Image: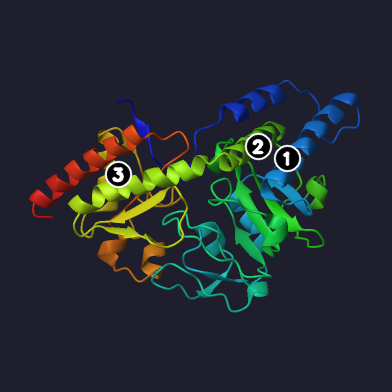
Amino acid sequence: MARVYLDHNATAPLRAEAKAAMLEAMELVGNPSSVHAEGRAAKGVMERARADLAEALGAHGADIVFVSGSTEAAALALAGRGLHGAAIEHDAVRAWVTEDLPVDAAGRVSVRDPGASTLQLANSETGILQELPEGLAVSDWTQGFGKIPVAFDWSGVGMAFVSAHKIGGPKGIGALVLRRGLDVSARIRGGGQEMGRRSGTENLIGIAGFAAAARAASRDLAAGAWDRVDKLRNILEKTLEPRANGTIFVGKGNARLPNTSLMVTPGWKGETQVMQMDLAGFAVSAGSACSSGKVKASGVLRAMGFGEAEASSALRVSLGPETTEAEVMAFAEAWLSARDRWAARGR
């Protein structure tokens, strides 16, 4: 079997629709800020993309600011505001908040003051979903967008942000969504692009690919593609559980992303599992792609009450719409074989 990619939460493969849109945008000469015909053509592509992204996000009554990705969007939305957050948030969020919101053993966060807080929609490591309180100031939708239904206009959230490469768009492009009437202080100043909120010539090629990926992701979601992925994830866990005594499937029984399974086998280092699966032909991870290269325990699992040994022994499998049952079963057998060898060595 060819290599199997099971790390969609880190990044999703580029969609054919996004690639086609990017190639078409490459042929455009104009700068979207120019007033001549070539500039207006580029501007038209960008504004159609903005409208398409708003449609996919259910954000018709909102402003969309194109940025380089969720990390920049988080800084734009959070810097200097002193909002409250939880230890399970992505590091790009934790960098800007007071980390004092409590997390329970199920990975759920209690928000005392929504208007002064940020809370993610879905966790990238565990897949656990949060219930967003009305009036929440900011929310990270990076992992949830495209995998579960979202509607910004109805969410009660002031601001949210997303990243294209999580839904099969290009890397290096994302968006901050603001409820109309709210504003942010620009961190990149200059030409006044993006309504003065983010200066610099817009990444038209990335924006076009982002919008095409958003349209395709919305189509797949409506067609039930992620329901099929959810069934595959459940098949995987049901296959592994009887032969994986002592392994914990984090978040099982709670609301999770349909594609995510985080397995904790205390004492079997996550990075060791990743390397063994890589050699066997499977791309998986030990947690967030932004930190999996660092030898440290998962802060998300520590916040949920797991000990050091458990938090250092996690393996994340994240499926995609193109994942097949044959690939899932092949991974299950490879992982179980590796686990048996680890157990036979006396752990």
Say if mark 1 contacts mark 2, CB within 8 Å: yes
User: Which residue is found at the position 76% from the left and 38% from the top?
Assistant: 201
Q: Which mark is residue 215?
A: 2
Colouring = rainbow
Where disc 2 sits, the SS reads: helix
Say if mark 3 contacts mark 2, CB within 8 Å: no
Q: CA distance from mark 3 to mark 1?
A: 37 Å
Q: Which mark is residue 52?
A: 1
Q: CA distance from mark 1 to mark 2?
A: 7 Å
Q: Is residue 48 left or right of residue 275?
A: right
Q: Is residue 91 left or right of residue 194?
A: left
Q: Amino acid at mark 2?
A: Arg
Where disc 1 sits, the SS reads: helix
Which quarter of the rendering shows the N terminus? top left
Observer-nearest of 343 and 326: 326
Please indicate, yes or no, whether residue 108 appears anywhere in the rendered image: yes
Residue furthest top in the image: 27
The crowd level at tag 2 (other Cα within 10 Å; few <14, some 14-19, many 20+) is many
User: Which residue is found at the position 85% from the left and 29% from the top?
Assistant: 39
Where disc 3 sits, the SS reads: helix
Image position, residue 341 (x, y; %)? 13, 45
Q: Which mark is residue 274?
A: 3
Q: CA distance from mark 3 to mark 2?
A: 33 Å
Q: Earlier in the sequence, mark 3 or mark 1?
A: 1
Residue 152 occupies quadrant: bottom right
Image position, residue 99 (x, y; %)? 52, 72
Q: Amino acid at mark 1?
A: Asp
Q: Earlier in the sequence, mark 1 or mark 2?
A: 1
The crowd level at tag 1 (other Cα within 10 Å; few <14, some 14-19, many 20+) is many
